[in-house]
Amino acid sequence: MTITTQNQIPQDWFASYYSSEYADSVKSSLTPDRTKREIDFILSTTNLPPQSHIADLGCGHARHTLQLAAHNHYLTAIDLNPNFINQAKQSAKASNLQIDFHIADMRTTIPPSKPYNLILSLFNSFGFFTDSQNQSLIIDWTKHLSKGGYWLIDIWNRDALIRNFQPSRAHQPNSNLTVTEEATLDTLAGRINRQYTYNYSDGRTATYQTSFRIYTPSEIKTILEAANLTIIKTFGNLTDQPYTLDSPRLVVLAQK
């Protein structure tokens, strides 16, 4: 297991990493069936009243945002990538959905017309920043959460990631793309640092650096309690499986 520092990785790595190459690499795994299962889980777990106000932080192409809006909820969706937001706007327009989209850093809160009933941070969209900034993000957004409202956070399971750590691997998300990953663990900072190289069959290449904070359940509990949130339940993914040391994900449902 390698210990490294984050010095060589730009602090704003997330501004470039979530690119068209990233989108190409995950597209085949983000199927409509998967999205439907995840939406069913979110709705059944939170039991939201009709026309709830929901914030989706780091929404990407807004696959969850769009489906939740289709279930008659009011959505505010935030992402730093203008291309992702513009594509999401087109999808919303095609489906006649009214969604409040923002091209913004999620550290900037978007106050709703009424307090949010649910705040979402899915698909590893929590843990980009420093520990103090990650903590402030939770506290600041919770100020706009209704009493009894929920946070739902979906991140890597640190325990499983460390137990199955691979410093180097390659995979082919489709026949035209090979993704190579070179990873190191900064065990003192609790971060996984990865270099992703995208190699296309036509010769194109692109390389990005990333650094994700990987939290233990107890660390997440401390962060949430600092924002006066209480963990209601933990899961091993977004389909209601129980959390274990071997779960691929740590999904936390917390309530104000």
Image (cartoon, grey):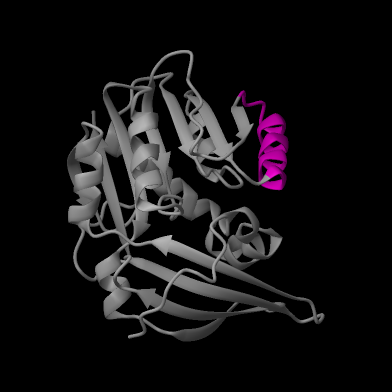
| In the image, farthest residue toward the front | 7
Quarter of the rendering occupied by the C terminus = top left
- The answer to whether any part of residue 2 appears in the image is yes
Please say if 171 is above or below 119.
Answer: below
Residue stretch rendered in magenta on the structure = 82-98
Q: Give coordinates of residue 48: x percent, y percent.
A: 33, 26
Q: Nearer the viewer, residue 125 or 123?
A: 125
Magenta segment's dominant SS is: helix
Q: Give coordinates of residue 222: x percent, y percent.
A: 19, 46
Quarter of the rendering occupied by the N terminus = bottom left
Q: Nearer the viewer, residue 45 or 105?
A: 105
Question: Residue at point 54% right, 43% down?
Answer: 59
Question: Residue at point 43% right, 62% down?
Answer: 212
| In the image, farthest residue toward the top | 113
Q: How many marks?
A: 0
Please say if 112 is above or below 167.
Answer: above
Left or right placement of residue 30 versus residue 230 in this view: right
Q: Give coordinates of residue 94: x percent, y percent.
A: 72, 33
Please say if 42 is above or below 48.
Answer: below
Q: Nearer the viewer, residue 4 or 173?
A: 4
Quick check: is 170 in the magenta stretch? no
Q: Give coordinates of residue 30: x percent, y percent.
A: 54, 58
Question: Residue at point 31% right, 80% down?
Answer: 164
Quick check: is 85 in the magenta stretch? yes
Left or right placement of residue 22 versus residue 159 in this view: right
Left or right placement of residue 104 versus residue 133 in this view: right
Q: Quadrant of residue 47?
A: top left
Left or right placement of residue 27 versus residue 55 in this view: right
Q: Quadrant of residue 80?
A: top right
Q: Quadrant of residue 99?
A: top right
| In the image, farthest residue toward the right | 202
